[in-house]
Amino acid sequence: MTRLRIGSRGSQLALWQANHISALLRERGHEVELETIKTTGDKITDVALAKVGTKGMFTKEIEEALAEGRIDLAVHSLKDLPTEVPPGFEIAAITTRENPRDVFCSRKYESIEDLPRAARVGTSSLRRQAQLKAVRPDLDIHPLRGNVDTRLRKLEAGEYDAIILAAAGLNRLGKTEFVRQVIPAEVMCPAAGQGALGIEIRAGDAATRQHLAFLDDAAARATTTCERALLNKLGGGCQVPIGAFAELRNGRLHLEAIVADPDGTKVLRESRDGTDPVQLGESVGDTLLQRGGDAILEAVHGQDIAQPQQP
């Protein structure tokens, strides 16, 4: 029996994810301990994280614990992991993916189309804001910080007419009572890696990698590798208006991607099929840059845009 120590953020969703992995490892006969680690992103609660712009703000302290040998593996929402994993670490497993799409949550309205003019919508990313503005430029969009419970409580209290969240987090926590619409990827392209968990270990830790091999899902690894290759090509993190959604269709990868102006006036879309995840992601990224994505991203990086992180 091997003793494995897991590091995780302390949010309700992060702990659900870590406990889910713990249970699967215990089923295999491992002894598991869980250590909760507070990250930079968790400490900054009053500033929009797009303003902070720190790469790895939800992973740095956890990686330090890994490097120091205080933990053996870290469970992350894959979309929180920078596309370039720092030297000394590797992603040992990418788990079977939950629904990667975004959902529309409301007490009174059934869909984005159903919202009245100037309705107040809470969203936590430039990516969502841009795509919302593209279909409903009349909406009054406000930043929304906090964990899933906090966001839902603000919706219930009437602070917002609707909020946009990731389907995966709500499904995992069983908090779907306000979900009115699963937004099609053609309307709101999800974040790269959304819905998947990334299990990070020290580079070269063959024993731990072997223990985790059963968690690695081939389809999830292929689709998220493709999405992350696109994000990497565009130089984006989770605070930029980039969407990427890959799925397997008849044994081939299909990638839909967007780069959007935060005010929704310009949304560049590109889709393509391929077999090599990295090659497909990079080629679609190249095309988006050539079509004007470089100018959009340059403008975003040069602006002081007050928007928080994706959940």
Image (cartoon, rainbow, N blue to C red):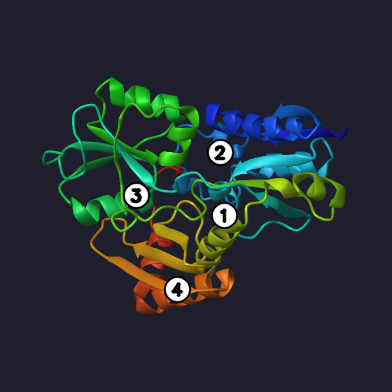
Residue at the disc numbered 3: 128
User: On the image, numbered disc 2 is attached to which residue?
Assistant: 41
Q: Residue at x 45, y 37 (%)?
A: 47
| Mark sitting earlier along the chain (2/4) | 2
Q: Residues within 10 Å of mark 1 (few under 14, many from 20)?
A: many
Q: CA distance from mark 3 to mark 2?
A: 19 Å
The residue located at (57%, 57%) in the rendering is: 219
**Sequence-first tag of 3 and 2:** 2
Question: Would you say 42 lies left or right of 308 here?
Answer: right
Vertical arrangement, residue 298 with respect to residue 64, above or below: below
Residue 119, located in which quarter of the rendered image?
top left
- Residue 213 lies, in percent from the top left, at 74, 50
Select label 2 or label 4 by which is in front: 4
Q: CA distance from mark 2 to mark 1?
A: 26 Å
Judged from the image, the secondary structure of the residue bearing numbered disc 3 is: helix
Q: Residue at x 37, y 56 (%)?
A: 189
Instruction: Specify few, some or many for label 3: CA neighbours under 10 Å numbering under 14, 14-19, or 20 or more.
Output: many
